[in-house]
Structure formats: structure tokens, C-alpha cells
Amino acid sequence: MHALLANITKILMIFLFLFTQQAYAENSGPEFNAANIQQALRTLDTLASHFKNSPAAANAINSNDITSLINNPQNQAQAITLLKQNGYNNPQDWSVIIQRTLAAYGAYQLKGQQKTVDAQMQNILQQMQQNPAVTAEQRTQMQATLQNAQQALANASDADIKTITPLIKDIETTMAKHSDYLPGL
């Protein structure tokens, strides 16, 4: 049960940012295939390794906020150069592939466990409601985050899950490599 809760927590961290560009991810951008996923993972590895000592950059990568990474004057030139060196003339294309990959990965990890996940999320909400140290604003924000996570799990396309399935080891290797300073991965 502890392992499941740890997985749920990890998945929730991943989904904190998934809805920012969902329409773009589903309707345009690069093709979602194994080659593009592997390229996006290599690029994530490059960016994370390069900016490992920059908390602001690590935060941007961790939340998949490529806009913050690129607009940060300290990182802008390096981030754009690294993305271009990795084949991305449009940084949004990298962000879309990573988002879809992580959404599909989260759904893959929790496949067949939806009732358990829903119950755990309800338990988290109840505990939060009973905790006097949590403000009303924090409760509202956490509830929205949990609902968004549930929605993202429900909306991960079967085609995306099928596409990432042979790449699970690559995804997990990349996530594990950088989990020490990118806790959302």
C-alpha cells in the first residue's frame, strides 16, 4: 500500500502541469511516436543535466514550464541553444511530447487501479479538510490539482499509452536519473 501511495504522489506531481497546453498537445505539434519520445527524453536529460545547479531552471524543467526556462535571462540563450541542438526549432514541440509522455506514463502506471487511486485521492482530500493548518485557499488549490490529476488519468489516450509502453524502461531511467533534484519526475 505504501508503494501505491508513493506512486500516486509521484503521479500527482507529474500532473500538476499537464493541462496548460492540452489542446495544443492533442491537435497539433509533432507526431507522437517512439522516435520523438526518445528524442524528447534525451533532450530532457540534456536540459536537466545542464541546468542541474540552477534552482530556477530545475524548477522550470520540473514543471515542464519551458516558457519560464526560456524567458529567464540567465538561462534563455543556453536553453534555446540546447533545444535547437536537440532538434527543436520550436521549444513548444518538446514540451508537448514530454507532457503527453508523462500523462501516458502516469495512466500506464495506474492502469487497472483507478478505484484504488480514486479512493486514495478522496482520503487525501478528507485528511486535508480535517487539517486545521491547511487554509481554505490551499484546500481549494489541492482539490483542483487532484481533480485535474484524475481528469488527466482518465483522458490519457489509449493510443498514447500504447505508444509509450515499449519505452517504459527509457522513461523510468530518465526520471530516476534526475529525481534527486527534479522531484516531479
Image: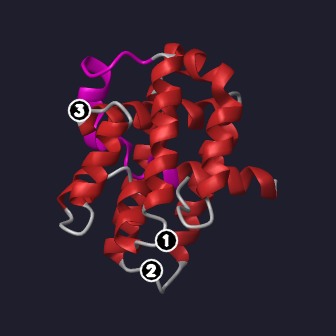
Label 1 neighbour load within 10 Å: few <14, some 14-19, many 20+ = some
Q: Which residue is mark 2?
A: 134
Give the numbered dot on residue 89: 3
**Mark 2 or mark 1, whichever is nearer to me:** 2
CA gap, disc 2 and disc 1? 8 Å
Residue 114 visible, this angle: no
Q: Amino acid at mark 3?
A: Asn
The quadrant in which residue 139 appears is: bottom left
Front residue of this view, candidates 133 and 156? 156
Q: Amino acid at mark 2?
A: Val
CB within 8 Å, label 2 to label 3:
no
Image point 35% across, 59% down: which residue?
A: 60
Q: Which residue is mark 1?
A: 129
Residue 15 shown in magenta: yes
CB within 8 Å, label 2 to label 1:
yes
Residue 104, above or below 14 = above
Image point 48% across, 56% down: which residue?
A: 48
Question: Which numbered disc flags the more N-terminal residue, 2 or 1?
Answer: 1
Q: Label 3: state its secondary structure.
A: loop
Label 3 neighbour load within 10 Å: few <14, some 14-19, many 20+ = few
Instruction: Write down the region rendered in magenta.
Output: 13-32
CA gap, disc 2 and disc 3? 43 Å
Image point 27% across, 63% down: which residue?
A: 75
Q: Label 1: state its secondary structure.
A: helix
Q: Amino acid at mark 1?
A: Gln
Residue 166 shown in magenta: no
Front residue of this view, candidates 40 and 46? 46
Type of secondary structure dominating the magenta stretch: helix
The image shows residue 76 at horizontal and vertical percentages of: 22, 58
